[in-house]
Amino acid sequence: MVKLRGKNASDELSISGSKGSTFTLHNVQTQEALARFAGKEDRYRHWLIEFVSHGPEAANQIRQAVTNGSQEAAVKLAHALKGRTGMLGMTELHSICLTLEMTLRNGEPATFWLEELERSADEMSKEISTVLGIQLD
Amino acid sequence: MSQSFKVFVVDDDPMILDIMRAILEPDCQIETFDSAEACQTRMQSEKPDYFLLDVSLPGMDGYTLCRLIKNDPALRNIPVTFVSGHDTIEERIKGYDSGGEDFIVKPFEPEELLRKVKVAQSMVLNQRSLAVQVEEAELLSSLVMASMDETGILLQFMSKLIAMNSTDEIASGLLELMQRYRLDGVVQTRIGGKTQTLSAAGANLPLEVSVIEHVRNQGRIFEFRRRSVHNFERITLMVNNLPLEDPDYCGRLRDHLSVAAQGVDSRLEALQVAEANQRTQAGILSALDSVGNTIMELREAQQRSNDDSTKMVVDFQETLAHSLYKLGLTDNQEKFLQNMVGDFMIQMSELINRGAETQDTLQRLNSKLGQLRSA
């Protein structure tokens, strides 16, 4: 799991890239996502950086819910992460969340898609950290 | 879009709220809430023009909040758009059933969101315009209804007026009409040389009479301060408390009172003519009685004259019959006298008979007079 240096992501993360500059992330439609933030790159960067911790944490919470047999909570968490990743332009993660949500909702075995989610969330987290130059512990 | 257009956004994801602010803040007033309950609390003090509701919320969900909004008369006209990650027909039907106006699916494009907001804003503007039109229509309708009611009062008075047969009744009716228009005032009627002034305070009060006498020659309609005077030949109507604060009502009252006063004047004229006719008829009947009596007297006098004449003739005939033999006349002389007396008697009889004919004529004339009187 990626650990941020400070308690609060929005307060204590530092962004190494210069503001207003464009960047690319693998499997992320950054231009479309940036448009959703009305072109405010600082806000987009803020939520991408927030995802560095939030994404893997959310995946972990889903797993915990599944392990605890809280299917409804797991569906809600998957649904929420689906919304978040969709708005951030993370197409692959969005698709995984969508499938996971459907799988959980249908009461089908979700191990495969949970693992896919955890893997993709970790990869996304690392890529964001790399691309945006976030200093992690 | 109008900056005054107020949007309440409910979503438990702070990033979605941040995105909403970024997209909408340049054009709208945005307030964001992370739960339906927080939004509900805010709605107690502030009402938006538009709701953007996430469906999946902790606690109360977006559909339930929408139903609450649509069940509240003060809020039900505010459009609701659901913002949901569920893009299924079932979810859309749920949104529709809960009373929502629109549906937008995450992830959405900013243009789509702006388009939805613009549509909602247009709906709100149309609703307000419609509300203004409805308000205006209701105002117009109430004015028409009020006017109809006022006209109804006038028509009722006019229909009763036809059956009124005295100045007292007419003056009281006119005061009652004024009362129904929430007016007080004075009515003066002038008919057949008789002037009567009446108000709620009583009849012929000196001050009221003097005021009416002052204003009755000031023209058909005369107004001073809160007073309004309607003058006609046989009626003066003075209102003491014109509602000047309501010019429209004042205008309608002028029309109604003018019509009422004119109607009263016509009715009083009719009463005046009827009274004159009654007087004429009474005079004619009296004259007929007098002529009838005279005829009867003539007839009686004629009867007495006939009786006297008959008696005189009979007496003269008897006296002559007893006296002739005392004169020692010759037969020829006696016969000559008897013939002469006989001729005289015949002429007298004819005269007496003519008197009887005169009596018959007088009797017929009297009968005809009797028929005229009884008619």
Image (spheres, coloured by chain):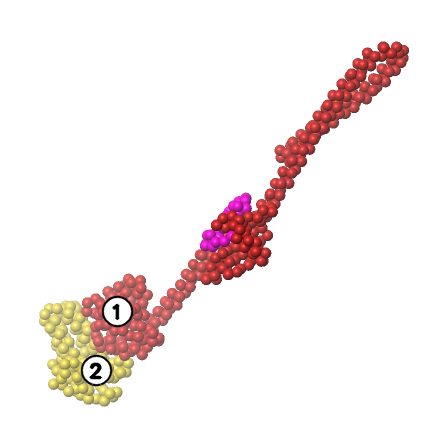
Report the chain shown in red: B
Q: Is residue B318 above or below residue B175?
A: above
Mark on residue A46? Answer: 2
Give the residue at x 75% y 23%. Answer: B305
Residue type indicated by callout 1: Arg
Vertical order, A116 against B63 (above or below):
below
Closer to us: B22 or B141: B141
The answer to whether any part of residue B316 appears in the image is yes
Q: Position of residue B340 (x, y in %)?
A: 86, 18
Residue ID at (65%, 31%)? B370
What is the span of residues highlighted in magenta in the rendered image? B159-186
| x then y, percent, for residue B16 | 23, 76
Q: Which residue is mark 1?
A: B42
Horizontal placement of B287 versus A56: left or right?
A: right
Colour that chain A carries in the picture: yellow
Q: Residue furthest front?
A: B206
> In the picture, residue B307 is in which quadrant?
top right
